[in-house]
């Protein structure tokens, strides 16, 4: 595809003057409040530029998912370690501790009600923490009952997707509308959990609820905000992806305006290739504080911006004391 075509379709090779101005303003807010620095994260057990992540993900449902959302159909579970019992999790943890693993992400496929049945392994969490692991959990759209259990067993952080488009929740996630997202947020924050909300950009194939998703969070004590750009694991009919780069950046910038003094992260789920590298570059220029699965070009851009650079081998949402 010619460069001119790429630019016309998604602005991959630059941004408008108006957006460039907003990017500079966003960076000013970020650097003023949080310092002119960036942390690059290598999650899971990925290998990148000679580094290896130290934060494996386990699936409490193996490779199976009842909900079978249209953007994944369970494919993302294949890279996770199957683990459906506290005993199995503690066996894995004993091995991982010898390997210098820093923490673990509890995840898995969703039930038909939209939550991940993490209760299968939660009794192991207090022991994991005694062993020195940071424990985060991808809850899906948690029920009040699951939220209580996450709090009871002392999970360090809960990751939740925030989707503001009712159509996407119904037609992509196979759930009965945006009420399940509201329910999950209320349940998790009501328990006083450390929540890491993920704004999913482009789930509908366009911007169609991302700003609403940010507004949904405004009533809660948000301490970190993660942005991802939909990168479906399987082909989706009638959905053209990814969304234009300028649209994705505009959502990220609005997030900084609404939540000016907390860390913002560019999460690991986003398109590959030139889109990924260009998004990283402009996100850095907009003052993003964290980037997962970074490119060499991102590191070079951070250096050219004079940012203080750190590296961590965990999920990008981890907030160590």
Image: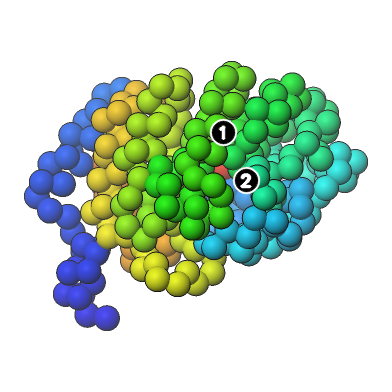
Do residues under tags 1 and 2 come within 8 Å of each other at their CB atoms? yes
Name the residue located 52 percent from the left edge and 62 percent from the top edge.
71
Please give the count of numbered marks on the rendered protein: 2
Measured from the top left, where is residue 44 in percent x and y?
63, 50
Residue 250 in the image: above or below residue 232: above
Tell me the SS state at disc 2. loop
Query: Does residue 232 appear to the left or right of 3 in the view shown?
Result: right
Which one is nearer the viewer's eye here, 18 or 171?
171
Q: Secondary structure at mark 1?
A: helix
Mark 1 Cα shell of 10 Å, populated few (<14), some (14-19), many (≥20):
many
Coordinates of residue 277 in the picture (x, y in percent): 35, 59
- The residue lying furthest to the right in this view is 87
Look at the image and tell me in which quarter the N terminus lies.
bottom left
Can the viewer see residue 173? yes
Place residue 214 in its image quadrant. top left
The Cα atoms of the two marked residues, 1 and 2, are separated by 10 Å
* Residue topped by disc 2: 114
* Label drawn at residue 184: 1
């Amino acid at each position: 595809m010619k460069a001119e075509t790429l630019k016309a379709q998604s602005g991959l090779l630059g941004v408008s003057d108006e957006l460039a101005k907003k990017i500079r303003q966003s960076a000013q807010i970020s650097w003023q409040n949080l310092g002119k620095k960036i942390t690059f994260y290598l999650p899971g057990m990925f290998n990148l530029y000679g580094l290896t992540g130290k934060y494996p993900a386990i699936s409490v449902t193996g490779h199976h998912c009842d909900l079978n959302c249209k953007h994944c159909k369970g494919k993302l579970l294949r890279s996770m370690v199957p683990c459906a019992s506290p005993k199995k999790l503690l066996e894995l943890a004993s091995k991982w501790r010898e390997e210098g693993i820093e923490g673990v992400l509890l995840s898995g496929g969703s039930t038909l009600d939209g939550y991940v049945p993490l209760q299968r392994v939660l009794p192991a969490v207090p022991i994991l923490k005694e062993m020195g692991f940071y424990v985060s959990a991808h809850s899906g759209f948690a029920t009040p009952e699951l939220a209580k259990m996450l709090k009871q067993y002392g999970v360090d952080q809960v990751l939740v997707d925030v989707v503001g488009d009712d159509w996407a929740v119904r037609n992509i996630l196979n759930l009965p509308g945006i009420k399940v997202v509201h329910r999950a947020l209320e349940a998790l924050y009501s328990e006083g959990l450390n929540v890491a909300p993920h704004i999913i950009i482009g789930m509908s194939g366009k911007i169609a609820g991302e700003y609403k998703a940010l507004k949904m969070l405004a009533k809660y004590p948000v301490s970190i905000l993660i942005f991802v750009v939909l990168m479906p694991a399987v082909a989706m009919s009638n959905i053209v992806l990814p969304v234009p780069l300028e649209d994705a950046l505009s959502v990220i910038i609005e997030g900084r305006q609404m939540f000016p003094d907390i860390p913002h992260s560019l999460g690991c789920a986003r398109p590959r290739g030139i889109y990924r590298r260009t998004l990283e570059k402009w996100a850095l220029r907009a003052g993003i504080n964290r980037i997962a699965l970074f490119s060499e070009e991102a590191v070079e851009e951070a250096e050219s911006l004079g940012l203080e650079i750190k590296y961590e081998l965990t999920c990008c949402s981890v907030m160590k004391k």
